[in-house]
Amino acid sequence: MNELDATVFAALFKEAFLKCFGHPMMNSLTETESKLLSGKIFDQTGLVIGAKSIKNYSSFVLTETNNKHENPSTATLDTLARYVLNAPYTDEVQRKDKESHYPYWFQYKKQFHGPVKKPVNKKLSPAFLFITIIPVLIIVAVLYFVEMKKPASKELADDFTSISEDSLSARGWFIKAKDAEYWDNRDEQPDHLTLFTLKGDNWPDSLHEAEIKNLLLRKTDADCFVAEVQLSDFIPQQNWQQAGILLLEDTSFSGKGLRLSIGYNDYSGGFPQSKEIIIQAIISNGKNSDKPEEIVHQLLFRIDSTNDELIKRNLKHSALRIEKRGTTFRLLFANGSMANSAFKELISRDIDLQPQFIGLFALKGFMDSTEVISAAFDRFNYTPETCNK
């Protein structure tokens, strides 16, 4: 990197820091801060800059005489510029196909080195302000109202007949925390996406950081929508095997989230043990709280040796549904031997949550002794709607 580009890079990195943290960068980033900035960049752009690289870059841009010369790739510079310039969400495959010339880095360089225009000192008459500016403000307000009323996301009905990574990406999906061994078996059941109840959770405990392996995500920016997932033959049998749908404010689990799942529970706090299959809904408050809130604990079946076949028949098809209307969330579920079983309401509640991502997941918490089982997702439906306020 030549001296001129190094100057631009330093300014770009400091601007990215300011956007993420809300104050100028005074010191090199800590490991935690580096992870947070890396996550924010990924959440907004769909592209990755590693936390270790970010930590090294922060030291480089703050030190005038640095023996270690950082030389970020043009792709990294473009990713930083995309974050600062609020570029549209993408991924590496799409950028390689459509924007391999890295336009946002060169756009930022051009703006950085562009001529500075001196302000013209003109006095505007009140009549000019009334005739020109007031109508413009009215038009802007109308356009803003129209934009807020319409759904921004695209409708999707995904039956998972094609689950190659390129095909999933083309339909708006991306994978987080990939475990290749199990991800490669996602085609285990034809015309389904198969995930596995791997060790992990979306909130941490004293020994583990929040992580869900093979979490399949997509962006959402609609204030009102309906999201529904259907599973085939998913029968959890040990704590805390579960699968379902997840709403997140960010992909690093530092923001709030809502998890709706079918799961297994035999924890009774010392009381006589009861083996249950339940519908559970959990609100997690991200990094500001290590205690989630369980808002739904709906018993589906108590398990004993006499009703195994009955349970299998009634979990031949199961479905979970989230309806969002502004701050009101309505949660529903359905199950039965037929795919068209009616939905039943679990809860309708106001929740302070602004999801930016919808995810499909399977997990078993941080239980080492619990077996890994498959969860076959048959269909996912997402419908953004006009908010009637």
Image (tube, rainbow, N blue to C red):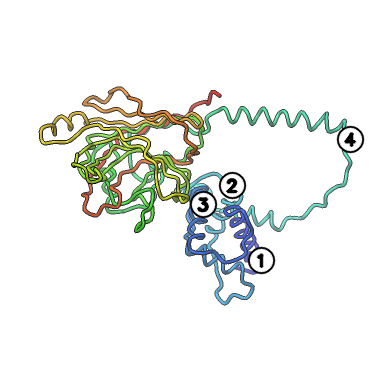
Residue type, numbered disc 2: Asn
Residue under pointer 2: 86
Looking at the rendered image, the quarter that the C terminus falls into is top right
Element class at badge 4: loop
- Residue position for label 4: 125
Find out whether the residues at labels 4 and 3 contact each other: C-beta distance under 8 Å: no
The residue drawn where x is 48% and y is 53% is 39
Residue ID for mark 3: 40
Q: Position of residue 325 (x, y in %)?
A: 48, 28
- Point out the tag, 4 or 2, that comes first from the N-terminus: 2
Cα–Cα gap, marks 3 and 1: 27 Å
Q: Quadrant of residue 191?
A: top left
Residue bearing mark 1: 4
* Residue drawn at the location 48% of the way across and 43% of the way down: 249
Tell me the amino acid under the disc marked 4: Ser
Q: Residues within 10 Å of mark 2 (few under 14, many from 20)?
A: few
Would you place residue 6 above or below residue 243 in this image?
below
Q: Are marks 2 and 1 in contact (CB under 8 Å)?
A: no
* Number of dots carrying numbers: 4
- Who comes first in sequence, dot 2 or dot 1? 1
Foreground mark, 2 or 1, reads 2
> Which residue occupies the extreme left position in the image?
306
Residue 232, x across and y down, in percent: 25, 34
- Quick one: 282 or 20, which is closer to the camera? 282
Considering only order in the chain, which callout, 1 or 3, is on the residue closer to the N terminus?
1
- For mark 4, does the 10 Å Cα neighbourhood hold few (<14), some (14 to 19), or many (20 or more) residues? few
Q: Residue at x 59, y 57 (%)?
A: 17
Find numbered disc 1 in the image and state the secondary structure of the residue it sits on. helix
Q: How far apart are marks 4 and 2 (CA)?
A: 36 Å
Decide if residue 10 is in sight here. yes
Q: Do the residues labelled 3 and 1 touch (CB within 8 Å)?
A: no
